Each structure stands twice: as structure tokens, then as C-alpha cells.
Amino acid sequence: MRYIILINSDEAAMANMPVEKIQQMSAAYGAYTEALKKSGVWLAGERLRPSQATTSVRVADGKTSVIDGPYADTKEQLAGFYMIEAADIDTAVEWAARCPAASVGTVELRPIWEMADYMPKQ
């Protein structure tokens, strides 16, 4: 089953982090990414630009609204993701717990609902 590991972090705290700490964190993410790849569970993963670069889009009554910034104002912002393939939730939890963000922020783990599982058959 495929899972998404959503990485949430406090952008304000990151902006004020000493360079040495940022370098350590970057190295930890590099090692984590390599471990995912070597194990064969890694499918995709990317860091996201800060939430100030967000564009929120909503359609109501046929009209499209485009808003600069994130949909919700929260303490933590979505900072990136990994998509993995794991045999079961326990294995996925083990990988999520190893993510560097789990020790400083929140990591959300969600199974991916495959489109083929919920799309009507033709």
C-alpha cells in the first residue's frame, strides 16, 4: 500500500534557526531519503516552498477565487512530503517515526486511497 508522509513545521522557527542547525537538519534529511531509497520503499518526495508562496483556489457558484497564501493560518505549515510503499501500517509508522521532522514538528501519515478503488467501473 502507498502512504504519504506529510511534514509539518514551524516556518518562523525555521527562519530563525542557526545555520549550523539547518546544515545538520539537511544532512539528516539526506540520510533519511537515502535510507528510504535503499530500502526500496521510496516512491517520491519533495520539499515545498514556504507558505507565503501558496496560492489557494476555490470555486463557488461557478466563480473561481484565487487567494495568495495558505487556506488556514496555523502554527505549523506543510513543508514537504514523502510517498512510500509499505507492506502495512506498522512499517509505514516506523518510516514516519524515522523522519527528521518527527522529532521537531509533526509528521502526518496517511494511506493513499487508490483511484481505482473508488472510481466507478465502466
Image: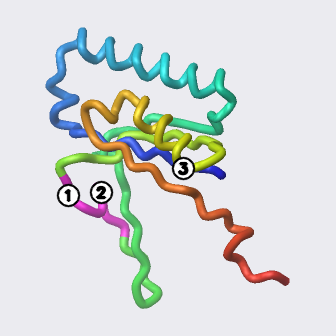
Q: How many tags in the picture?
A: 3
Which amino acid does the dot numbered 3 rest on?
Answer: Ile
Which residue is farthest right? 122
- Tell me the colour scheme of the image: rainbow
The residue labelled by disc 1 is: 73
**What secondary structure prevails in the magenta region?**
loop
* Disc 3 from disc 1: Cα separation: 30 Å
* Disc 3 from disc 2: Cα separation: 29 Å
Q: Which residues are magenta?
A: 66-74
**Residue positioned 40% across, 18% down in the render:** 28
Res. 27 mark = none
Is 98 situated above or below 58?
above
Q: Nearer the viewer, residue 41 or 43?
A: 41
In percent of width and height, residue 100 lies at 37, 27
Label pair 3/2, CB-CB below 8 angstroms: no
Quarter location, residue 7: top left
The residue labelled by disc 3 is: 89
Which amino acid does the dot numbered 1 rest on?
Answer: Asp
Q: Residues within 10 Å of mark 2 (few under 14, many from 20)?
A: some
Label pair 1/2, CB-CB below 8 angstroms: yes
The residue labelled by disc 2 is: 70
Mark 3: which secondary structure? helix
Which amino acid does the dot numbered 2 rest on?
Answer: Pro
**Residue positioned 54% across, 36% down in the render:** 45
Viewer-nearest of discs 3 and 1: 3
